[in-house]
Image: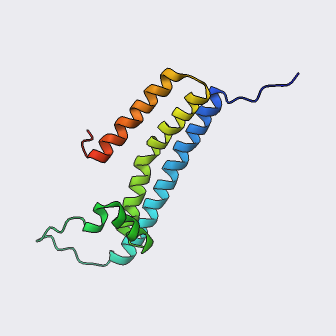
């Protein structure tokens, strides 16, 4: 008697658990590396508290962050790690939707895709929370 190879709910939950763990660990590692690079380059600088110089302009756009990562700038690498940390639950929602599709649970697939749509729309529009 042949057994049917299907993906069970526990398999999906294990995959999602690994995605969350790996996403958090990788993002922590990226932020740590960026922090080390930043401290190596700017650790000995004197801080001037008389004038506030906010965050540099290159970390305000995705293209600037990517260019900063490619050129080895610490702040951009830290920002990339934070973006990776924020995107980890979004990836989890995508895999949840895939799991519900494989289980043919259309109600939860729709709910999950609606949640994903709300998160993406709020992130792209800048009206989150």
Residue closest to the eye, 62 or 36 = 62
Q: Residue furthest right?
A: 1
Count of marks placed on residues = 0
Question: Which residue occupies 39% across, 62% down?
Answer: 78
Can the viewer see residue 35?
Answer: no
Looking at the image, residue 104 sits to the left or right of residue 120; the answer is right
Can the viewer see residue 6?
Answer: yes
Q: In this picture, is 83 found above or below 76?
A: above
Q: Position of residue 83 (x, y in %)?
A: 39, 53
Question: Which residue occupies 46% across, 46% down?
Answer: 88
Residue 49: quarter of image:
bottom left
Q: Position of residue 121 (x, y in %)?
A: 32, 41
Looking at the image, residue 20 sits to the left or right of residue 75; the answer is right
Q: Residue furthest left?
A: 50
Q: In this picture, is 123 found above or below 46?
A: above
Looking at the image, residue 129 sits to the left or right of residue 50; the answer is right
Looking at the image, residue 4 sits to the left or right of residue 23; the answer is right
Question: Which residue occupies 43% across, 47% down?
Answer: 87
Residue 122: quarter of image:
top left
Q: Classify the position of the C terminus by image quarter.
A: top left
Q: Classify the position of the N terminus by image quarter.
A: top right
Q: In this picture, is 12 found above or below 50?
A: above
Q: Position of residue 33 (x, y in %)?
A: 46, 65
Q: How is the image coloured?
A: rainbow
Question: Which residue occupies 31% across, 61% down?
Answer: 61
Q: Position of residue 6 (x, y in %)?
A: 71, 29
Residue closest to the eye, 74 or 94 = 94
Q: In this picture, is 100 found above or below 123?
A: above
């Amino acid at each position: 008697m042949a057994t049917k190879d299907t993906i069970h709910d526990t398999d999906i939950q294990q995959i999602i658990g690994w995605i969350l763990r790996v996403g958090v660990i990788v993002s922590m590692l990226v932020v740590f590396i960026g922090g080390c690079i930043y401290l190596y380059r700017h650790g000995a600088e004197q801080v001037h508290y008389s004038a506030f110089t906010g965050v540099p302009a290159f970390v305000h756009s995705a293209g600037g962050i990517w260019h900063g990562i490619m050129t080895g700038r610490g702040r951009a690498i830290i920002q990339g790690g934070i973006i990776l940390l924020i995107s980890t639950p979004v990836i989890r929602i995508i895999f949840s939707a895939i799991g519900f599709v494989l289980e043919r649970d259309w109600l939860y697939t729709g709910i999950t895709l609606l949640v994903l749509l709300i998160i993406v729309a709020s992130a792209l529009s800048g009206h989150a929370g």
